[in-house]
Image (spheres, helix red, strand yellow):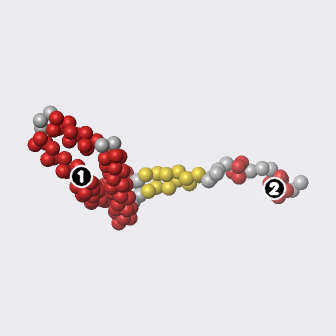
Amino acid sequence: MNSIQKRQSEPELSDDLPRQLTLTVARVDLWSVAKIGFLLSVAGAIILNVMTLVIWLMLDAMHVFGSIEEFLTRIGADNFVSLLKYLHLPQVMSMSTLVGVANIILLTALATLVALIYNLVASLVGGLQVTLMDE
């Protein structure tokens, strides 16, 4: 038996083991992080508006706002009844939209700032090592 036949008949251990590759995330592109942060923030604002509408409609269907108004008039707090005008649907949705826009601006800026800080720290310590495995 020659050496070529012997090598072909013996199973190799490296073929059975999964391959591993270690990569280092040394830098994150700030523009990509800003775009992704913006899109995720817009999705969050849309979810916030939809959930605000659903919760308001549920509370209105359960007559919660009418019960609050009735309770306030019964205890003699008629000056607080005028505050219930802020609980009407257009006002609630306007406030929800304002909060959503503020979240879009703040979360986009925060995500970009975190990416910038990561780039600074990664330049000092070398970045984040990730091991990928082929199964």
**Which type of secondary structure does the marked residue at label 1 adopt?**
loop
> Looking at the image, which is closer to me, 91 or 7?
91
Judging by the rendered image, the residue that carries numbered circle 2 is 8
Percent position (x, y) of residue 132? Answer: 55, 53
Judging by the rendered image, the residue that carries numbered circle 1 is 88
> Looking at the image, which is closer to me, 115 or 54?
54
Tags 1 and 2 touching, CB below 8 Å: no
Rate crowding at label 2 as few (under 14), some (14 to 19) or many (20 or more) other CA atoms within 10 Å: few
> Looking at the image, which is closer to me, 96 or 37?
96
| Amino acid on which disc 1 is placed | His
Residue drawn at 35 percent across, 58 percent down? 46
Direction top: furthest residue: 75
Residue drawn at 20 percent across, 41 percent down? 69
Percent position (x, y) of residue 6? Answer: 83, 53
Q: Is residue 129 visible?
A: yes
> As displayed, is residue 91 above or below residue 78?
below
Number of numbered tags placed on the structure image: 2
Residue drawn at 23 percent across, 49 percent down? 87
| Amino acid on which disc 2 is placed | Gln
Percent position (x, y) of residue 25? Answer: 44, 56
Percent position (x, y) of residue 86? Answer: 19, 51
Residue drawn at 82 percent across, 58 percent down? 4
Q: CA distance from mark 1 to mark 2?
A: 80 Å
> Looking at the image, which is closer to me, 21 or 62?
62
